[in-house]
Amino acid sequence: MLRIDKLKQLEICDAYFISSSTNRYYFCGFKSSFGYVIYTEGNAYFLTDKRYGEEARAFFNGQSIKVIDGNKNQLNDAIQEILSSASINTVGYEDNRTSCSDFNDLSGLINKKFIAVGKQIDKLRIIKDEYELAQIEAAQKVTDKAFAKILTIIKGGMTEKDICAELEYQLKINGADGIAFDTIIASGSNSSLPHASLSKRKIENGDFIVMDFGAKYNGYCSDMTRTISLGKPSAEMVKVYETVLKAQTLAINALKAGINCKEIYNISNNYISANGYEKQFLHGLGHGLGLEIHEGPWINNLSDEILEKNTVVTIEPGIYIEKSFGVRIEDLIIIKENGIKNLTNADKKLILI
Ligand SMILES: [Mn+2]
């Protein structure tokens, strides 16, 4: 899908130079590991090397985007020719996705004023179109299916790595193109670390197991977290679980288009604090996602962003008791014009296996 004309909305520069694979895909709909997109005065150019030339010309055939393929020197010549136009004074580039070295090469090619517009470009991706919403919903369906299946597989004595391998297999055989990010399986005392790395620890009775995982589907991500118990949890574990769940439910119930992200964060955080865990909620409440697992809007104590309709966000409060255990529960939600749609269908009452 061609979304390149969205760059017009920025009204910052005379030309835009896109070099990241994510934004090349977002604006042009063509997957490639190397290339540039230049957009100026309503004209779009897709520059790439010979590996993608034939496929790109077929893909963009009949569309208002010109494909240029060649070696480094040929591409540099083309960049100079396009950007040297007298009507171009300013060139916007992705400062947040361009290495210093690549920027030095680019700015050395052409004597124009370069303007950092990475954040503004990322903002164009916050509101999703119908196609994107459908891909994210499909990704989450796969993720829910994999979760239902893993509950029938987990048994005492399995390692975190074993569970991870089974879960990622379930994502893939249920239709995922791949995983959206490195799966987190954090059991027992490891679960007090929000982003624990995978270990060979064997799960045992009395463990909480935090599973944070997601699928990629047609390039789009899903993201969910559930915390389950192997055997009977202690009274404190149950209390923490119920506190996190209530903090999440309160925030989800308050979600709507037009609300300030900080306000949503505060709803969860105030509830967690009021229950005695004010120092144990160690991260933001949620984030947007799409082609990348973490995108705007950001739902945390510093974010003044306003939630808009057709934005997709996670709501994922957690409480972490150092050296003991942790709980996180995460759902994926579309903000609609009226109300919300929670894409995560897995049960949230504490599951004991
Ligand atoms: Mn998340």
Image: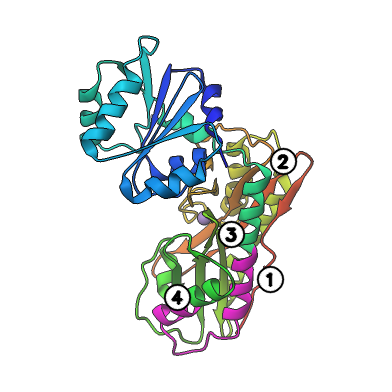
The quarter of the rendered structure image containing the C terminus is: bottom right
Mark 4 Cα shell of 10 Å, populated few (<14), some (14-19), many (≥20)? many
Residue 294 picture location, percent across and down: 48, 48
Distance from disc 1 to disc 2, alpha carbons, whole Å, reads 24 Å
Query: Is residue 171 highlighted in magenta?
Result: no
Provide the secondary structure element on which disc 4 rests.
helix
Q: What residue does disc 1 label?
A: 349
Report the residue marked by disc 2: 256
Callout in the foreground (3, 1) = 3
**Dot 1: what SS?**
loop
Query: Magenta residues?
Result: 141-166
Circle 2 Cα neighbour tier, 10 Å, few/some/many (<14 / 14–19 / ≥20): many
In-image side of 236 versus 161 (left or right): right
Label 3 secondary element: loop
Tell me the number on the disc at residue 123. Answer: none
Where is residue 113, by image quadrant? top left
**Amino acid type, mark 3:** Glu
Residue 209 drawn at (x, y percent): 50, 75
Q: Which residue position holds label 4? A: 164
Amino acid on which disc 2 is placed: Lys
Where 18 sits versus 347, above or below?
above
Label 3, on which residue?
Answer: 330
Question: In the figure, 311 relative to 136: above or below?
Answer: above
Mark 1 or mark 2, which has the lower sequence index?
2
Q: Disc 1 or 4, which lies upstream in sequence? A: 4
Q: Residue at x 40, y 10 (%)?
A: 87
The residue at the point 61 percent across, 54 percent down is: 136
Mark 1 and mark 4: Cα distance apart in space:
22 Å
Residue type (three-letter) at the residue carrying disc 4 = Cys
Secondary structure of the residue carrying tag 2 is loop
Q: Given contact means CB atoms under 8 Å apart, are the residues at marks 2 and 3 in contact?
A: no
The reply, left or right, for residue 103 in relation to residue 296 is left
